[in-house]
Amino acid sequence: LFSYQSFSLSSLSTSAIIPKANVSLSIPSSQLVENLCNGKAIQNCRFCLKALSTPEVIAAIDTTELGTLIMKLGAANAKATLNVYNEIIKKLGSPEALKALNCCVEAYKYAILSFEMVSSKFVEDPQTANYDVAVIGPEIANCEKELINSKVQAPRLLAGNRFMKYYVSMGYEITSTLELENPNEY
């Protein structure tokens, strides 16, 4: 997959700061992350590799464990973004903006619930888990549309929405992978 000739000493010294995909190849599970982040559903491979470069994720031994961690990360990201929405709601006065923000708050509450639900039923039913993750996407897209229509200018919210979509694509990819790995059980 990677040619080792491309390694230079300078690229190794920066690996502590910028997670590079090919640094952790010696750890077996990083291949799981590698495969996942190169999957068809993944919207941003670099984001995926960076988000999944934590020691906890690298220690994951199989698709199920990796998937559970992705759902936890997705839920944590949704909670963080929800906090930003709640902060901004306190500051904004216009009714149109409030309507859009409240729509987004609902979308994020839904996302948190879905990610948490998926991480608990991930193993028994990958097919339902796959659907539960997929339906977060349209909720976030709807939130974005509302923000644009009401002309809410908030880069932090747009970044939060973008990251959320990346987590949804990662969740979708891992649940699809799990479905393929366990076809006979359902």
Image: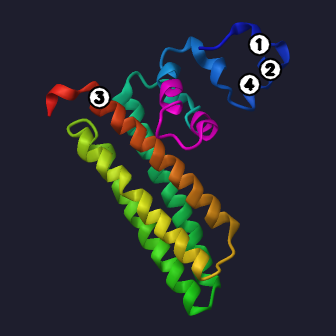
Point out the residue furthest to the front here: 40
Q: Give the residue drawn at x 63%, y 64%.
A: 158
> Residue 115, image x and y in percent?
38, 51
Q: Give the residue drawn at x 42%, y 32%.
A: 66
Depth order, front residue of 146/49: 146
Query: Which image quadrant for residue 129?
Result: top left
As helix, strand or loop, the secondary structure at mark 3 comes to helix
Query: Which image quadrant for residue 10?
Result: top right
Between label 4 and label 3, give the one nearer the viewer.
3
Point out the residue furthest to the right here: 10
Contact, CB < 8 Å: mark 2 with mark 1? yes
* Distance between the alpha carbons at the discs numbered 1 and 3: 34 Å
Q: Give the residue drawn at x 69%, y 75%.
A: 153
> Residue 11, image x and y in percent?
80, 20
User: Circle 3 is placed at which residue position?
Assistant: 180
Contact, CB < 8 Å: mark 2 with mark 4? yes
Point out the residue furthest to the top here: 5
Mark carried by residue 11: 2
* Distance between the alpha carbons at the discs numbered 4 and 3: 33 Å
Contact, CB < 8 Å: mark 4 with mark 3? no
User: Circle 4 is placed at which residue position?
Assistant: 15
User: Circle 1 is placed at which residue position?
Assistant: 7
* Sequence-first disc among 4 and 1: 1
* Distance between the alpha carbons at the discs numbered 4 and 1: 11 Å
- 83 above or below 1? below
Circle 1: residue type = Phe
* Residues rendered magenta in the picture: 33-50
